[in-house]
Amino acid sequence: MEKFTTHTGVAAPLRRSNVDTDQIIPAEYLKRVTRSGFEDGLFAAWRGDPDFVLNHPAFAGASVLVAGPDFGTGSSREHAVWALQNYGFRAVVAPRFGDIFRGNSGKSGLLTAQVEEKTVIAIWDLLDTAPGTEVTLDLLERTVSAGVGLAQVRDSFDIDDYTRWRLLEGLDDVAITLSHADDIDTYEATRPSYKPATL
Amino acid sequence: MGRTLAEKVWDEHVVRRADGEPDLLYIDLHLIHEVTSPQAFDGLRLSGRPVRRADLTIATEDHNIPTTDLDKPIADLVSRTQVETLRRNCEEFGVRLHPMGDIDQGIVHIIGPQLGLTQPGMTVVCGDSHTSTHGAFGALAFGIGTSEVEHVLATQTVPQTKPKTMVVTVVGDLRDGTSAKDLVLTLIAQETTGGGQGYIVEYRGDAISALSMEARMTICNMSIEWGAKAGLIAPDEKTFDFLHGREHAPRGVDWDAAVEHWRSLATDDDAAFDKEVVLDAAAVEPFVTWGTNPGQGAPLSADVPSPEDFAEPNQRVAAQRALEYMGLTAGTPLRDIAVDTVFLGSCTNGRIEDLRTAAALIEGRRVAGSTRMLVVPGSVRVRLQAEQEGLDVIFKQAGAEWRGAGCSMCLGMNPDQLAPGERCASTSNRNFEGRQGKGGRTHLVSPEVAVATGVLGHLAAPSDLATV
């Protein structure tokens, strides 16, 4: 996994709540067996609309998505994270995330910065006034900032300590767990005999 | 202080606990399907890791397979490749697979309980958010992403931060014509799609105890739709009766030992939950969704709401967008909404009991001329059982289509999809924009409401059929 310390990039405002993973990538795009190439399915139902935010020239090349509450609810499809990453997003800022989506993001290296709703609204307003404004996410300091002077928006964001550490170090979860293989062996020796087996 | 059911199951599965780290939980059962596993197996190959416990892993084909022409190869080449990839992966890594054509093939969340693999006190995961279904047995069951699928394949564990606990106490009795589906849709509308976020939810109370195992699965299945990590119900005699004698249920002295342990899992009297929600089952009416998330629902007797009815700005905007997408006008009685398609099936309502209920209601009646109805059993065994009972004949005589087993139109990944603008009453779990096909419009309903709607051609309650 690629390390994440700080990132500065053009932010796109997605003024919607409850953007579920079916919106992020519809099921018809989930048939691929690779981890790449999912950018064509990102927000597929909305991309055809010329007024959709990602079709706006000022937000071309956006790498930070700023969305309303309950972003990534619904299906467990990690393809939603890959689609965002394949498109070029490094981070999503929102007041609340779907649980599984947020977990998946942490595993794949997409930063999900949880902020208060008023911060999202302030960034949206800033991006409306000055489309193309860059937003900086500093994972060391856990801060999100955008704009300058009086128009500046700056706030801290929430992310759990463990995910933050893994993102900062770019660590592979499986390798961490396998370093505790002895604990797994010990646990397995205590499992009751009545537990079912599939083979 | 005592512990809750969820805490007991959690504690029993902690392999490693350290400050500043999530708990490392042992996984008793890992369910696999074709859509969320290929990249996980690729990861194993890349790192040269085996599947640690193939004997605690089981795979089936469900999400991406057709429900017609079952004797022919899958027509969509990309879908076929995905299914064949699962077959190759299972063979290479020694994982048991129930492919199309196998008698135990079906939706992952139907076959686990059916085989008796889902048991109280277990941890169950699957790369599918409706894994919460298995919570009906008092198991801690939750959906995971593909990275976690790889993690479980490689280590049989998954790191998890312990969620808070919530109890939903459902008092009173459900009235005739209402079911577990109406109950859970009512709950989600009340609590909204984010209301359960950060919690493992235990459902209890007289109304829950009165439910069959199948109805309990419907309730737990929808836990994710209000954001909960998992939903579970304490095991009781109904749970034990359901399991006893099933292929993978314990036998003899093992059965006795297991039941003794399962009884000890119930939430202690002095245990505390972080939150409690109380719901009156007697007040539940046949319920439908009108919007594009499962929290946007109302009793069938109501009218389509107006965005102005919502105080919270986000909900108001979401309602406005939903009405536009759904092609609905505020103030229209929900019963006046004409429906093109009825879908009966899915891991929410594709079990034999659902089919029996629906068949009893549709027997001697006809699906309205302007409406099509698809009946998709949740598994091959459900299908065969239904055929043995003659339910397929009842559905076909009523004008419904009788299909092969799978996820089908619940997620519109196979050819069973809605056309743009097509309106569907669906017994599935999600009414998201485009969920059942691009531009398709979904109203979530119970099997009873689905049948009444199919017969009358507009959203309807079972009681509306009295005169038909």
Image (cartoon, coloured by chain):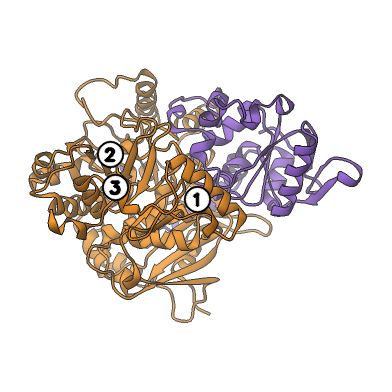
Give the class, few, some or many, for how many residues have Cα within 10 Å of label 3's Cα (few <14, many ≥20): many
Q: Chain of mark 2?
A: B
Circle nearer the N terminus (2, 3) = 3
Tags 3 and 1 on a common chain: no
Q: Chain of mark 1?
A: A
- Give the colour in which the image draws chain B: orange
> Mark 3 sits on what residue?
B110
Give the class, few, some or many, for how many residues have Cα within 10 Å of label 2's Cα (few <14, many ≥20): many
> Mark 1 sits on what residue?
A185
Kindly report which numbered mark, 2 or 1, lies closer to the viewer in this rendering. 2
Element marked by disc 3? helix
Element marked by disc 1? helix
Q: Are marks 2 and 1 in contact (CB under 8 Å)?
A: no
Indicate left or right for B383 with B256 as reference.
left
> Mark 2 sits on what residue?
B341
Q: Among the chains, which one is purple? A: A
| Label 2 – label 1 distance at C-alpha | 52 Å
Indicate left or right for A66 with B66 as reference.
right
